[in-house]
Image: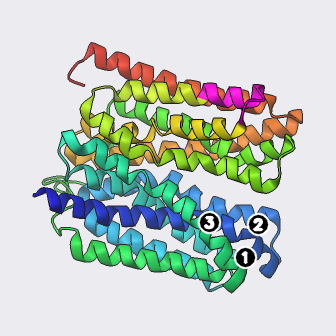
């Protein structure tokens, strides 16, 4: 396939990734308006976010396996359709059970999109360009988050909370159309992947220790950084900052994440993805401890933590295609995504529990650091395996 076509496919998959991000982050900027309009409690409001993320634990592995067997295009179109359907369901109802059900439907579709987009992208790019492609793709989530938090709240305040959801569905419809028209019909399952008996056990036997180590890195990393993103505004406010400034400091994490294309460029020109994952986690760990223990410039430290964190996602996504056979990329990414969702669910919960039990953020920040240190240990183990088996 010619190079221009590869980048066109990247644009199609980027639109799908942006749909996932907007659908995921569409609720927080308008949550206050939803709660006020419909009389929801804070617990019910929080549940609307959980209902999107929880399906990722259950559907990620089957979604990856289905994509391997039936094709990324077919599964991608179905998952985008489900995402749109769920988002529209939320926009058109005023009853909490239906709101929660719509978010869960959107989550099933969105999490499936998140699983299949990286392996779908990897099959079109040669090894020397996989890093930059994954780096560009990984800007989709921070860009979607930045757009949602800076635009949706204003739209919701002026025209009502349903409009941002309708716009999210519109972006999904654009991504669906782009994939239908521009993603090659044969661009899905690797030849031969869908032949024979559909068996998870048979497929899973081809997933070796390195993939599970990458899954461990991604799970522990997300447990740490998502805990920080969840509680950073409250922490900064506890240090006397205004709510607006505290939220701004927390959002700088996403600005740093936009460095992923540069990290991808470095991946394509070095052979150190394992060291990037290890170093990135250790740097984030150190900076988080400095944020808590020092009175240094919080603006600079908040930006630095985002920059350091950008050294982890692109290597995680770029290394998976090197660790499995092409016909098992979907399953491998499904495993990594499922483990990520476990970390995303457990990390903020445990960190919040420590904050409630102790009345301070001391142990909470130590736990965030412990998650990141664990991620670095998984990356170190991966580096050791690579050293012992250079062909890894």
**Residue sticking out furthest to the top:** 388
Q: Position of residue 158 (x, y in %)?
A: 70, 83
Please report the residue visible at 61 percent of the width from the left and 48 percent of the height from the top: 252
| Cβ atoms under marks 1 and 3 closer than 8 Å | no
Secondary element under disc 2, as helix, strand or loop, is: helix
Name the colouring of the figure.
rainbow
* Residue for point 76% across, 66% down: 44
Numbered disc in front, either 3 or 2: 3
Q: Which residues are magenta?
A: 285-297
Q: Residue at x 34, y 57 (%)?
A: 117
Dot 2 corresponds to which residue?
44
Instruction: Check the image and report above or below for 209 versus 193.
Output: above
- Residue assigned mark 1: 96
Ranked by sequence position, the earlier of labels 1 and 3 is 1
| Quarter of the N terminus within the rendering | bottom left
**Disc 1 secondary structure class:** helix
């Amino acid at each position: 396939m010619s190079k221009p076509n590869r980048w066109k496919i990247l644009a199609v998959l980027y639109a799908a990734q942006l749909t996932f991000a907007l659908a995921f982050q569409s609720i927080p900027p308008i949550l206050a308006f939803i709660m006020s309009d419909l009389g929801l409690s804070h617990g019910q409001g929080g549940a609307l976010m959980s209902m999107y993320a929880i399906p990722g634990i259950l559907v990620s592995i089957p979604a990856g396996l289905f994509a391997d067997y039936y094709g990324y295009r077919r599964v991608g179109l179905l998952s985008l359709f489900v995402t749109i359907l769920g988002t529209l369901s939320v926009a058109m109802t005023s009853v909490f059970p239906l709101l929660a059900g719509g978010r869960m439907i959107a989550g099933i579709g969105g999490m499936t999109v998140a699983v299949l987009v990286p392996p779908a992208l990897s099959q079109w790019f040669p090894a020397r360009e996989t890093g930059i492609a994954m780096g560009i793709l990984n800007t989709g989530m921070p860009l979607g988050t930045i757009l949602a938090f800076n635009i949706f709240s204003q739209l919701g305040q002026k025209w009502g909370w349903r409009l941002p959801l309708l716009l999210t569905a519109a972006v999904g419809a654009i991504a669906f159309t782009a994939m239908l028209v521009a993603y090659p019909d044969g661009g899905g399952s690797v030849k031969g992947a869908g032949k024979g008996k559909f068996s998870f056990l048979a497929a899973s036997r081809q997933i070796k220790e390195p993939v599970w180590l990458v899954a461990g890195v991604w799970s522990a990393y997300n447990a740490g950084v998502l805990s920080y993103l969840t509680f950073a505004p409250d922490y900064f406010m506890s240090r006397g900052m205004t709510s607006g400034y505290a939220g701004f400091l927390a959002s700088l994490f996403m600005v740093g994440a936009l460095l992923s294309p540069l990290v991808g460029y470095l991946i394509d020109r070095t052979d150190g993805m394992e060291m990037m994952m290890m170093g990135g986690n250790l740097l984030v760990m150190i900076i988080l401890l400095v944020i808590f223990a020092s009175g240094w410039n919080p603006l600079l430290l908040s930006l630095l933590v985002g920059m350091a964190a950008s050294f982890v996602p692109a290597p995680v996504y770029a290394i998976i295609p090197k660790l499995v056979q092409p016909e098992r990329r979907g399953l491998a990414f499904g495993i990594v995504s499922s483990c990520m969702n476990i970390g995303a669910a457990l990390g903020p919960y445990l960190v919040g529990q420590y904050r409630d039990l102790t009345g301070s953020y001391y142990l909470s920040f130590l736990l965030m650091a412990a998650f990141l240190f664990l991620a670095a240990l998984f990356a170190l183990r991966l580096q050791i395996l690579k050293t012992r088996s250079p062909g890894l």
